[in-house]
Image (tube, rainbow, N blue to C red):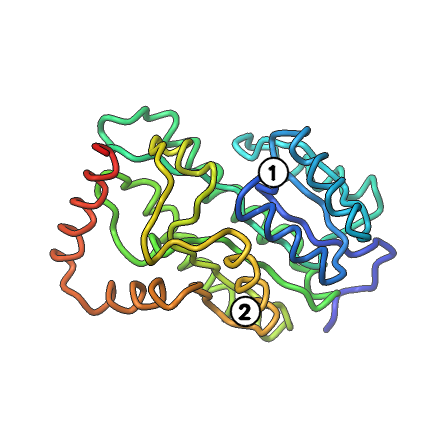
C-alpha cells in the first residue's frame, strides 16, 4: 500500500552542504532540476552557495543552519521543513568529520561528537522521512568512504563510523527496494577539502586515489540515480575496496597503521 498523498512540496535535503563534497553534490542536484534545502552549521557559507545556485538559473535553495551534533537536530530540521510546506523526496547525508590520532590519546568528547554526526544524525535523517521518500519514489544518498571497507588504526573511530554508514546503507538498500526507495553509499577516497584540517591533517591529499569533489559528486549522483548500492569513484578507489576484502586483515591493519602514522608526521 502506498503512503497517503501529501500537499507538501518535494525537496532534496543536503547536509554538510557548506563546502567540499556537500557543496559539490548540491550543485549537481540543482543542475539536474532538484529543489534544495541546504543544512550545515555555517549560515554565511550556505547563503553564498544558495546565491551561486540561483545565479546559474536554478531555484534558490532554502538554507537551514543546524548543528547535527545536537540530539534534537532532526526534530528541528523536520519542524523547519514542515513550516515551509516541504518534505524530502531525497536525503543526502554528507555531514561528517574525522580525527587522526590514537583513540586513547584523542579528546574523548570530540570523538563522541564525531559519532553523533557521522552515525546518529545520519541514521535519524535516513529513517525519519521514509514515507515521504516512498511517496515521491525518491531515495537516500549516504556519503561513506573507502575507509568503511577497512579498519583504521590512528583514526579508529572515524573508520568505524564509515563502516557503519556503509553497512547500514547496504542493508537499507535491500530493505527499502520493495518500496521503490533508492539507497546508495557513496565511498570516495581522498578529496582535497576542509576535511583534512578538521581531522588534524593540514596537508592536502595527493596521489592516484585523490579526486576533486566535483567528480565525486557527479559519479555519486549518477550511481544514485541508476540505483547502485555502492559507488566508489575512480578506478583506484574501486580496487582498494576489492583488495581490502581479499588481503589478510593483519596485513591491511599494518598498511593502514603506517599510512596514518605518515600523515601525522608530514
Q: Quadrant of the N terminus?
A: bottom right
Work out whether 11 lies above or below 118.
Answer: below
Work out whether 139 lies above or below 258.
Answer: below
Residue 5's label in the rendered image is: none
Work out whether 18 lies above or below 238.
Answer: above
Q: Quadrant of the C terminus?
A: top left
Circle 1: element type: loop
Q: CA distance from mark 2 to mark 1?
A: 23 Å
Whole-percent x, y for residue 147 in the image: 33, 52
Q: Residue at x 55, y 32 (%)?
A: 71
Q: Which residue is mark 1?
A: 18
Whole-percent x, y for residue 78 in the image: 71, 42
Query: Image check: 120 left or right of 259?
Result: right
Circle 2: element type: helix
Q: Residues within 10 Å of mark 2 (few under 14, many from 20)?
A: many
Query: Image check: 77 left or right of 54?
Result: left
Whole-percent x, y for residue 151 in the image: 25, 51
- The earlier-in-sequence mark between 2 and 1 is 1
Query: Image check: 216 left or right of 76?
Result: left
Residue closest to the eye, 75 or 99 = 99
Q: Residues within 10 Å of mark 1 (few under 14, many from 20)?
A: many
Residue closest to the eye, 122 or 21 = 21
Q: Which residue is mark 2?
A: 223
Q: Residue at x 84, y 53 (%)?
A: 8
Q: Residue furthest right?
A: 7
* Label 2–label 1 contact, CB within 8 A: no
For residue 202, which quarter of the picture?
top left
Whole-percent x, y for residue 160 in the image: 33, 47
Q: How many marks?
A: 2
Amino acid at each position: 500500500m502506498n503512503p497517503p498523498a501529501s500537499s507538501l512540496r518535494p525537496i532534496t535535503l543536503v547536509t554538510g552542504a557548506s563546502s567540499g563534497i556537500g557543496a559539490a553534490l548540491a550543485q549537481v542536484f540543482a543542475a539536474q532540476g532538484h529543489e534544495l534545502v541546504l543544512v550545515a552549521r555555517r549560515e554565511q557559507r550556505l547563503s553564498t552557495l544558495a546565491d551561486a545556485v540561483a545565479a546559474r538559473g536554478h531555484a534558490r535553495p532554502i538554507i537551514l543552519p543546524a548543528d547535527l551534533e545536537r540530539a534534537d537536530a532532526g526534530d528541528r530540521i523536520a519542524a523547519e521543513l514542515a513550516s515551509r510546506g516541504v518534505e524530502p523526496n531525497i536525503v543526502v547525508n554528507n555531514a561528517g568529520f574525522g580525527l587522526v590520532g590514537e583513540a586513547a590519546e584523542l579528546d574523548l568528547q570530540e570523538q563522541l561528537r564525531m559519532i553523533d554526526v557521522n552515525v546518529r544524525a545520519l541514521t535519524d535523517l535516513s529513517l525519519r522521512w521514509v514515507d515521504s521518500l516512498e511517496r515521491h519514489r525518491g531515495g537516500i544518498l549516504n556519503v561513506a568512504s573507502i575507509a568503511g571497507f577497512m579498519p583504521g588504526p590512528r583514526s579508529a573511530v572515524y573508520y568505524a563510523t564509515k563502516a557503519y554508514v556503509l553497512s547500514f546503507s547496504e542493508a537499507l538498500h535491500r530493505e527499502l527496494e520493495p518500496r521503490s526507495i533508492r539507497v546508495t553509499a557513496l565511498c570516495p577516497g581522498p578529496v582535497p577539502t576542509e576535511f583534512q584540517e578538521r581531522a588534524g591533517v593540514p596537508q592536502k591529499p595527493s596521489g592516484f586515489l585523490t579526486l576533486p569533489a566535483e567528480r565525486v559528486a557527479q559519479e555519486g549522483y549518477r550511481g544514485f540515480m541508476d540505483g547502485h548500492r555502492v559507488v566508489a569513484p575512480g578506478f583506484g578507489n574501486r580496487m582498494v575496496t576489492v583488495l581490502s576484502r581479499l588481503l589478510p586483515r593483519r596485513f591491511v591493519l599494518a598498511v593502514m597503521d603506517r599510512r596514518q602514522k605518515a600523515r601525522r608526521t608530514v
